[in-house]
Each structure stands twice: as structure tokens, then as C-alpha cells.
Image (cartoon, helix red, strand yellow):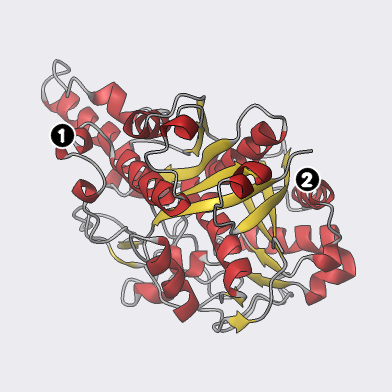
Amino acid sequence: MRRVVVTGLGCASPLGNSVEETWAGLKAGKCGIDTITRYDNTNFKVKYDAEVKNFDASQYMDKSAARKMATYCQFAVAAAKMALDDSSLMGNAEVLENAAVYLGVGIGGLEITERSMMEYAKSGQTRMNPMTIPLLIPNEGAGNIAMAFGLHGATHTIATACASGTDAIGNALDQIRCGRYDVILAGGAESTQCGFGNLGFTILQALSSKWADDPSKACRPFDKDRDGFIMGEGSTILVLEEYEHAKARGAKIYAEVAGYGATSDGYHLTAPNPDGICGAKAMTIAMKDAGVKPEEVTYYNAHGTSTHKNDSGETQMLHIAFGEAAKKLHISSTKSMTGHCLGNAGSLEAMVCVKAIEDGFIPATINLDNPDVEGGCDLDYTPNKGIEMPVNVAMSGNFGFGGHNGILVFKKVN
């Protein structure tokens, strides 16, 4: 089986418009959650989110091209450019001609849907932006990446809710392993920062709302005082490359993408199955695929949404999949700093695993002041302060509405 490695990283996140800024923020325990600025929040119960700040699309693409993209597409193209620059593949027409794109997108251009529906209603159902459909559909992120950089392999969009970014990377891994491609740009992109998204998730009782006076305290995975997730946004792209192909061109290798596992709860539209069995099965499949035992995994980047059902359910999954090794596992939820980036969550957290291996650093779960042990959150979640230590094997997990469970395993390449 062909080995697959990461040779490039690109990121626009609530902590910064580069991998370096984002990782520095995570190491410092910085929070990217703040009061909503993208729209008037006066009539909304939820007053805060995790926005990408000071993003200038013209740094990554022509202004005319940017005008034809929804926000999530702009983030995706920017992250892809950063990743290609980082991989030293930018301008390598011979390689890029045959490269593919696998992008996870949970929703797509939601702000376009909102804006166009308001125009449609106001006009008496006679008018809307003629570009409405091309702007809002979720496949356009991958399509715009391919158009921007001359990629002519498959451009696939994976939509598995909050597991989309993870599943995109996992599917890309399999495509390179089987010999279909040598290089794939894989990751996720999302932006639901609009009133329509706010109200939609609020009505589901999914969002945190009680921390308007101090939004930086709002995301509290595994803490007794957690009251819901915080909407994040952005895009993260990883350049995945066949190992021998990467070595032959002298590429920098960050880590190996060693394993992937996916299952479905088949249980509920929005809630995970509380028994944790199917999520744990995905973890077990991924570890077997990577050829590692539970006790060999140093770090697990949790889905850790700061909701009661997810945090206790995910802990249960870890107990099942890792057994006694769960008690020694270093765990953290970086959503405590980035918010929940939905379709980009898994790809952002995959990047965190790669950087944890490269730097030998496990980021913290901030705001974890009172662990909810009685509620089933009884493991080591790296509270409030990161740890410097060697990381040879890292795992990330994401679990989406509809019961989608996705797990990735990364290894250090010696």
C-alpha cells in the first residue's frame, strides 16, 4: 500500500490568516471568539461567533474573481494558494495538471442564500442576483480551487456535516493509496456567519448564548458550565502526496496520513448515539488502518463541541476504543479557541495534529475550569495550558449531524 504524506499546509481561521498565525494562537491559548461584526446582532439571542478577521481576498485572487465567490469559496482558494506555496508546487504545471481536489463543505454559501431570498421576497418573487446558484452551491469551493490553479484531476465535494473536512482528507488518502493520484489538495471550507445561520442553529438549541459579556469564555468543552457550540468559519487545505513522489522532488514532509476510519450512527438527525459504539468503531478502524495500537497514540484532538451530548458521548467513545489506554491519552478540544468551523472543523483539526507532531506540542482546552466528571467527562483534556512533549502519533475525530463519524490518524515520519 502506497504511503501518503503532508507536504503543504494553508489556513484561514478565526485565529489568523495563515498556518503560522493560527498555530501560534493555539499554542498561546488565544481565543478567536468575539462579538459578531459581520451583521447586526440586535435581534438575535446569540451575540458572538468566531469570525475570520482582517481577511483580504485580493491578496490571494483577482478582485473580479472574488466577486464571483461566496465567502467560503474565497477562504478555500486562499488556503489552497497558501498550501501550494508551502509545498513548492505552485507553478509546477506537470504535477498540478494531474492533481485533484477533495473539499469538505457542510453547507456552502449560506449568506448568498439569505441575501438572495430577501431580494426575492422584497421584489415580489421576480428578482435575484443572476449568480445566486453558482455562488451558493457547495461544490463551487473545489471548482474554484481547480480553476484558480489549473488542476484537472477530480474535484469532489464531501458533505458530511461537521465531519466533512475529515472525510475529505480520508477519501483523498484512499485515492492516493490506490494509485489514482500522486497529489491531492484536501481539506474543508465553511462560512455560515449570517443571521440565517445564527437563527437556524439557535432554534436547534445548539449554540452557546450566555457569555455575551465575555465571549472568550463561551466555548467550554468538557466543562460543567458549557452551554453550546460557537460558530466558526474558515478553510484549511493540506497537500497530500505519495511518499516516494514527495521524496523524489525533495519536498518538506510534515507527517504521514496513516489511517482513516468512518462509520454511521444511524440513530438521530442531530444527536450522537449516547452509547458511543459506532464512533468508537471508527476510531478502532482508523487505528487498525494506521497500524497503531491505542497505547501508541500520544494525542487526540477531540471534536469537543462544548455541548453536553457531544462531550460526554465522545468521552464514552474513547473509553470503548482505547480501553485502559484512554486514561493516559492526551486530549484537547481546540474548538475552545477557534469555535466550531463546521465543514472546516476536521481539516483545521487535522492541521493541528500535523503541527503537534512537527512541534512536539499539545495545545490546551481553554476555559476548562470545572471538568464535568459527574457528567461523564473524566479523562485528561489538557486543561488551560498546553504541553511540550514529543508526539509520534496523533488522531483527530469529528462527528456530524446525521450520525457521520470520521477519524484520522497521523504519524511522525523519521
**Placement of the N terminus among the 4 image quadrants:** top right
Position of residue 327 relative to residue 282, above or below, is below
* Left or right for 62, reference 193: left
Pick the front one: 209 or 69: 69
**Residue 163 visible in the current orientation:** no
Residue occupying image coordinates x 38% and y 58%: 13
At label 2, the amino acid type is: Cys
At label 1, the amino acid type is: Ser
Q: Secondary structure at mark 1?
A: helix
Label 1 neighbour load within 10 Å: few <14, some 14-19, many 20+? few
**Placement of the C terminus among the 4 image quadrants:** bottom right
Q: Nearer the viewer, mark 1 or mark 2?
A: 1
Pick the front one: 54 or 333: 54
Q: Secondary structure at mark 2?
A: helix
Q: Which residue is mark 2?
A: 278
**At which x and y percent is residue 166?**
59, 46
Of all residues, the one furthest to the top in this rendering is: 126
Q: Which residue is mark 1?
A: 64
**At which x and y percent is residue 117?**
23, 28
